[in-house]
Image (tube, rainbow, N blue to C red):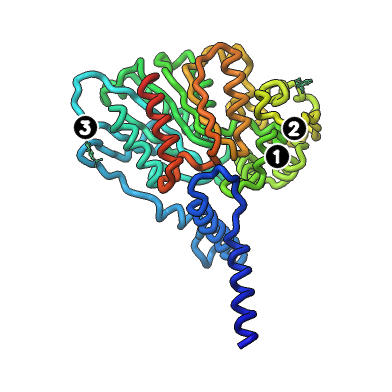
Amino acid sequence: MGKKLILLLTVGVLASYYVYTPLPDNIEEPWKLTWMVTVSKTVTYLNRFSEFLGTNRFVNIAALFLKVQEVPPTSDENVTVTDTTFNNIPVRVYVPKRRSGALKRGLFFIHGGGWFSGSVAMSSHDFLSRETAERLDAVVVSTSYRKAPKHHFPIQFEDVYNSLKWFLRQDILENYGVDPERIGVSGSSSGGNLAAAVTQQLSEDPSVKIKLKTQALIYPALQPLDMDLPSYRENAHFPTLHKSDVVKSWSNYFTTDKSLEKAMLLGQHVPAESSHLFKFVNWSSLLPEKFKKGHIYNRPIHGSSDLAKKYPGLLDVRAAPLLADDTQLRGLPRTYVVTCQYDILRDDGIMYVTRLQNAGVQVTHNHVDDGFHGAFLLLDFKISYRIINHYIDWLRENL
Ligand SMILES: *[C@@H]1O[C@H](CO)[C@@H](O)[C@H](O)[C@H]1NC(C)=O
Ligand SMILES: *[C@@H]1O[C@H](CO)[C@@H](O)[C@H](O)[C@H]1NC(C)=O
């Protein structure tokens, strides 16, 4: 009897330790978040275990977990949904059925997933695009792009840019009944990175005559140079996005060579001859006091120039939109930025807000005090609808 009780107690303690997730006091629906984090932790462990046993004999569990969240293109009474290709890039297009006679808004959406995962078919992305199309009477193009680790920068960027340029062709816009004066780009997380990058590229591309009216960046990743920002220090272990995942995603965007990831973790990936670039990501001058709090700005350390020579994408403005100079920023369209308090990427977004404002760009900044990375598209959570509604309201007024 005694032994059984001890066993039961031990299992109980281990289970609660496994499930226990420390969360800040102002997080809404904490139990739901704890449950979600426990499920994703379990998927990660199962995945590591199956990799340990040999991936050939087992299906990739993480990929399967994402696959079951995918939905086929399904039209409903309000929106026609079709899978097609733009410039050979797969896209899913949402066309509202409402007949107003007038030309419609156009919205080009880029999903996130660390440049290695996610898809337009995921039910959360599908829901958002459908909802945006219906509520704004907008034609929404949700674009795919090739992923790491098979493909590295600049492939992801180029796929998105080629797909966007196809959408912006006069004949394509006419075909979909889109007003060329009312087109916006949006993206979340690594999709926000790609959105910011293609928006910059487009503003300087003389071969494309049609320009964007808006860009909307939802907790975007905007630079891999300084990974010691206050938001990195405060949220390195926040359960929905860890520092180790962010560093791995950035590193895998450029290469599968592990030495880059190691150098990034030590902050030794930027060579001395590129130290002038740190002024573009200097949180000491670019963050409002509220976000600097008690943090001390450390002078950046420098690594050898080998890695940056081997992987020049690391310091390329198409991967790190914060590296654009003020002249480049001045030409950008009206901008919407969402940042979340409990997000390692928070300060990337806030620094971009400051830099755009300094360059005279009109910016709306929605900082979510109880937000965390991923909150935009967790459709079981109240916070998700709060952020989505604010975003759609902004588009309604500005696009
Ligand atoms: C279609 O639009 C109507 C009116 O806005 C709404 O009541 C209905 O729920 C929508 N249908 C779907 C499938 O979303
Ligand atoms: C960052 O900004 C601070 C002033 O806020 C300045 O003292 C420091 O030299 C700057 N560092 C770099 C690398 O630009």
**In the rendered image, is residue 74 in sight?**
yes
The quadrant the C terminus occupies is top left
Say which quarter of the image contains residue 293.
top right
How would you rate the neighbour count of disc 1 (Cα within 10 Å): few for under 14, some for 14-19, many for 20 or more? few
Give the quadrant of the N terminus. Answer: bottom right
Q: Nearer the viewer, residue 369 or 282?
A: 369
In the rendered image, residue 191, in percent from the top left (x then y), is placed at 50, 35
Q: Residue 300 vs residue 123: left or right?
A: right
Give the residue pinned by disc 3: 97
- What secondary structure is marked by label 3? loop
Write the residue at 41% across / 24% down.
394
Ligand 2 within 8 Å, label 1 CB = no
**Residue 157 appears anywhere in the view:** no
x, y percent for residue 6: 64, 80
**Contact check, label 2 and label 1, Cβ < 8 Å:** yes
Q: Tag 3: residue type? A: Lys
Give the labeled residue for mark 1.
233
320 left or right of 131 in image? right
Q: Position of residue 332 (x, y in %)?
A: 51, 16
Q: How many marks?
A: 3
Residue 350 percent coordinates (x, y): 60, 27
SS for dot 1: helix
Q: Earlier in the sequence, mark 1 or mark 3?
A: 3
| Real-space Cα separation, disc 2 to disc 1, in angstroms | 9 Å
Tell me which label, 2 or 1, sits earlier in the chain: 1
At a point 54% along the width and 64% down the height, the residue shown is 56
Nearer the observer, 327 or 366: 366
C-alpha span from label 1 to label 3: 48 Å
